[in-house]
C-alpha cells in the first residue's frame, strides 16, 4: 500500500508517545509523514524505514497540515495522531472500497477509546446513518442528522488538499475548523460509515490549544454572539462551493446549509431529548418548534424523518465479529497500550 496511502501524523509536546506509535505504524508499509510542532526535536530510539519526520516548532497547525499534504504523492490519505492506533485490516478494506467507488470521498469505521485502561465504544449507532445521496446538499442533511467527525477517516488526497486550499481565513476556532473539514468533504463526495473496527484512540491529556482561540463548547458556538462571524464565514464558504462547483442556486444552497446547522443544534440537546421528534403534537417550546420545522424540511426534500436506531451490532464484540483480521489487530493494539481486549 506504500504507493496508495499516506498517513499524516500531527504531534505536539508528546514525544513520550512517538516511539511506541511509530514502531507500530512503520510495519504497515505505507508512507508516514510526521509533523512535529514541539520546541525540541524528537530523537527516536529505533530506526524507521517508512517514516519522514519534519520538525516545525511554532508553525501554525494549518500551515503544518498544508505542508504535509504537499509532500503527499499517494491518492489516499489518513490523518492520525500520536495516540491513535488504526487497524491495518481496515485500511486495506477501505482502500479497496474507495478504489471501487469513485463517487465516495472517504470511509470510516467504528472508533474505540482507551479510557483509563478500559476500551469503550462511543456513538455505536453511527453506521445506521449514511451520507450517500447524489445531491451534495442533501448529503449534508443526511450526515448531520447524526454527526460524527470525519477528520480521521481514509480520504481521497485531492479532497483533503482542496479543503486546505480554500480554507476560509476567518475561521480560527478549533471546533469550527473540524466542522469545516466535515462540511467540505461531504459536499465533495459521499462518505461511508461502516460497522468495522477502525482504530483505538487513547485518552491522553490534551497538549495545548491547537488554534489560537478559546476552545468553546458546542453550545457556546451556537448560542454566543461572538462566534457568529466565524459561523457566518464558514456557512458562506460552503454555500459558495455548492453554487460555484455543484451548480446549485444560491437560494437552495443557503437553505440547505442553514438547515444543516439547525440539525447540528439539535445534536447538542440533552440526551433525554436527542431522539425526540415531533409527530402530531403542537410545538410548545422553542426547541419543539425547531423539531417541527426540521420534520417539515425532511418531508420536503424527500428524506425519512430520523428515528432512533434499532439496537443491533452495537457492542465491541459485535463490531470485531465483522472482520476476524481486524479483531487480531485489536488484540495487538490492546497489548501495546496495556489494555485488556476482553
Image (cartoon, rainbow, N blue to C red):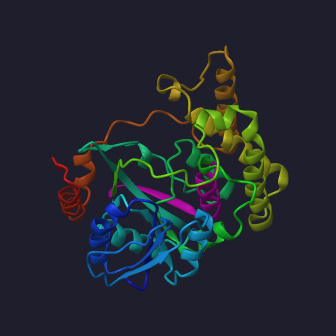
Give the percent coordinates (x, y) of residue 330: 23, 58
339 versus 223 height, above or below: below
Report the quarter where the N terminus lies: bottom left
Q: Position of residue 227 (x, y in %)?
A: 72, 41
Q: Residue at x 64, y 28 (%)?
A: 291
**Image vertical order of residue 266 relative to residue 107, above or below:** above
The residue range painted magenta reads: 176-198
Asked if the stretch drawn in magenta spans residue 243, the answer is: no
What residue is rendered at 69% in x and 31% in y? 223
Residue 100 visible? The answer is no
17 and 277: which is toward the camera: 17
| Residue 174, x across and y down, in percent | 60, 50
Taking the image as shown, residue 191 lies to the left or right of residue 250, namely left
Residue 334: x percent and y percent? Answer: 21, 55
For this view, does 85 lie left or right of residue 266?
left
Above-or-below relation of 246 to 125: below
Compared with residue 249, is residue 56 higher up or lower down, i.e. above or below?
below
Residue nearest the viewer, comparing 202 with 240: 202
Residue 183 forms part of the magenta stretch? yes
- Judged left or right of residue 256, residue 147 is left
Q: Residue 297 sits in which quadrant?
A: top right
- At 42% across and 86% down in the image, what residue appears? 3
Q: Is residue 78 left or right of residue 162?
A: left
Q: Residue at x 65, y 44 (%)?
A: 302
Q: Quadrant of residue 40?
A: bottom left
- For the question of whether residue 120 can be seen, the reply is yes
Amino acid at each position: 500500500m506504500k504507493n496508495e496511502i499516506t498517513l499524516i501524523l500531527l504531534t505536539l509536546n508528546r514525544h513520550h508517545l512517538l516511539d511506541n506509535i511509530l514502531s507500530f505504524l512503520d510495519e504497515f508499509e505505507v508512507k508516514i509523514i510526521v509533523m512535529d510542532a514541539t520546541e525540541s526535536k524528537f530523537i527516536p530510539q529505533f530506526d524507521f524505514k517508512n517514516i519522514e519526520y519534519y520538525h516545525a516548532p511554532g508553525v501554525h497547525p494549518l500551515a503544518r497540515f498544508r505542508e504535509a499534504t504537499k509532500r503527499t504523492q499517494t491518492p489516499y490519505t489518513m490523518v492520525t495522531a500520536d495516540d491513535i492506533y488504526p487497524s491495518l485490516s481496515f485500511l486495506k478494506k477501505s482502500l479497496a472500497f474507495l478504489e471501487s467507488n469513485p463517487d465516495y470521498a472517504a470511509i470510516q469505521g467504528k472508533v474505540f477509546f482507551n479510557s483509563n485502561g478500559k476500551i469503550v465504544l462511543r456513538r455505536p449507532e453511527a453506521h445506521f446513518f449514511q451520507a450517500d445521496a447524489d445531491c451534495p446538499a442533501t448529503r449534508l442533511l443526511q450526515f448531520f442528522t447524526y454527526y460524527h467527525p470525519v477528520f480521521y477517516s481514509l480520504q481521497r488526497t485531492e479532497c483533503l488538499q482542496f479543503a486546505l486550499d480554500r480554507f476560509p481565513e476567518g475561521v480560527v476556532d478549533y471546533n469550527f475548523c473540524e466542522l469545516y473539514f466535515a462540511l467540505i468533504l461531504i459536499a465533495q463526495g459521499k462518505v461511508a460509515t461502516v460497522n468495522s473496527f477502525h482504530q483505538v484512540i487513547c485518552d491522553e491529556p490534551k497538549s495545548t490549544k491547537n488554534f489560537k482561540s478559546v476552545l468553546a463548547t458546542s453550545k457556546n458556538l451556537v448560542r454566543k454572539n461572538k462566534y457568529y462571524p466565524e459561523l457566518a464565514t464558514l456557512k458562506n464558504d460552503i454555500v459558495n462551493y455548492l453554487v460555484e462547483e455543484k451548480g446549485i442556486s444560491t437560494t437552495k444552497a443557503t437553505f440547505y446549509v442553514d438547515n444543516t446547522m439547525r440539525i447540528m443544534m439539535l445534536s447538542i440537546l440533552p440526551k433525554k431529548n436527542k431522539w425526540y421528534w415531533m409527530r402530531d403534537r403542537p410545538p410548545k417550546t422553542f426547541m419543539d418548534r425547531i423539531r417541527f420545522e426540521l420534520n417539515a424540511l425532511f418531508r420536503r426534500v424527500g428524506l425519512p424523518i430520523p428515528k432512533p436506531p434499532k439496537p443491533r451490532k452495537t457492542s465491541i464484540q459485535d463490531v470485531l465479529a465483522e472482520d476476524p483480521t481486524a479483531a487480531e489487530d485489536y488484540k495487538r493494539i490492546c497489548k501495546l497500550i496495556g489494555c485488556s481486549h476482553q
